[in-house]
Image (spheres, rainbow, N blue to C red):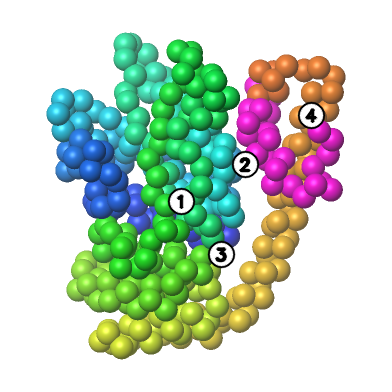
Amino acid sequence: MADIYQPHDRLFRAVFSDAAEAASLLQAALPDTVREGFDWTTLTLDEGTFVDEALRESQSDLLYQVQHAGTGQPVSMYLLFEHQSSPDPWLRLRLLRYCCRIWEAERRDDPDRSELRPIVPVVFYQGPRGWNHSREFADLFPEAARSWPWVPRFAHELLDQTSLEPEAIGGGVKGRIAQLLMMVAFGRHVDAALDRAARWTLSLRQAEGGVDEFRRFLAYLAAVQDGDVVETFKEALERHGLELGGEIMTYAEELLAEGEARGEARGRAEGLIEGEQRGEQRAKVEVVEGLLRIGVAWEVIEAATGLTEASFQALKAQLPESDSGVAT
């Protein structure tokens, strides 16, 4: 059955760890100036994640390598999947930190290198509200300081899924279905997105591994929506000519039959997990605040706890005001 705790991340990583699906998504969604700059047939996936541990409930990431079309030089393509309840203006600061971790990893792997590999940061955003912040890092500084030569400059690319209609979704087959079902998960264009996802699912029927992919998508939908939505998806599949017989039908019926019980279990489990996680987060916050009160420097705190000042503030912001301790 589906993992009910991080279904968005698991679907994102399962689908877009496929370099062909990632290349199709990026070519379809990036601006022409970026899309035409790379040889997408050379895109490959690198292993690893660079996201702060405290933020892995709301972020996931994938790192690729691709050749620049003009020079043939290797470039890193860093895809950060963001699905918070609202856009975060400080995402740009975290992106810079993640890019620095990528460069540091490259230097560890190749101590003799004399140059850094360029990184194209791409934010893939899903949420209930559209992105409303600048993509320029320098805009985090006072306006009068933004032109100063020592202010870091970079901009991230943005794939804001909240602004798309179902018919505007691009990419490969699996990537389109994943994006459409994420649209459903966040309550946008539910009927139209399910109908279009059902039509794309038809092309998985004859593909190698298509049955397993279908099970993945059905399980994701069951993990993030109630039985009525799963039933609507099943009806859309049948309406478009996909006969849900045999093992697949049994699987769909199991998901539907267990939907209510699983929803109740999920609520109880998530409540327990949330309580445990909040307790762990509160403990981390209290430790850091205690160190700050006695004058411990941030570089010492980071070495001891793994939390930077920015990730500490992000962790603290996740707690209710009553749990967040004293201000630093």
Whether 319 is drawn above or below 188: the answer is above
Q: Amino acid at mark 1?
A: Tyr
What distance separates the C-alpha of mark 3 from that of mark 1? 20 Å
Query: Which-is-in-front pick, marks 3 and 1?
Result: 1
In the picture provided, is 71 more to the left or to the right than 123? left
Give the image quarter of residue 107: top left
- How far apart, in angstroms, are the residues tagged by discs 2 and 1? 18 Å
Which is more N-terminal, label 1 or label 4? 1
User: How far apart are the two marked residues, 2 and 3, measured between alpha carbons?
Assistant: 19 Å
Q: Reading the chain from its start, which is encountered first: label 4 or label 2?
A: 2
Amino acid carrying label 2: it is Ala
Residue 68 shown left or right of residue 137 in the figure: left
Element type where label 3 sits in the image? loop
Secondary structure found at label 1 = strand
Residue 28 is marked as none
Cβ atoms at labels 2 and 3 below 8 Å apart: no
Q: Earlier in the sequence, mark 2 or mark 1?
A: 2
Please identify, in this view, whether the residue under mark 4 or under mark 3 is nearer the observer: 4
| Residue found 84% across the figure and 23% down from its top | 293
Distance between the alpha carbons at the discs numbered 4 and 2: 19 Å
Classify mark 4: residues with Cα within 10 Å, few (<14), some (14-19) or many (20+).
few
**Where does the magenta region start and end?**
303-328
| 320 in the magenta segment | yes
- Badge 4 element: loop
- Residue 110 percent location from the top left of the image: 34, 18
Q: Earlier in the sequence, mark 3 or mark 1?
A: 3
Question: Which one is earlier in the sequence, the residue at label 4 or at label 3?
Answer: 3
Q: Are marks 2 and 1 in contact (CB under 8 Å)?
A: no
Residue annotated with mark 1: 125
Tag on residue 328?
4
Q: Circle 3 sits on which residue?
A: 4
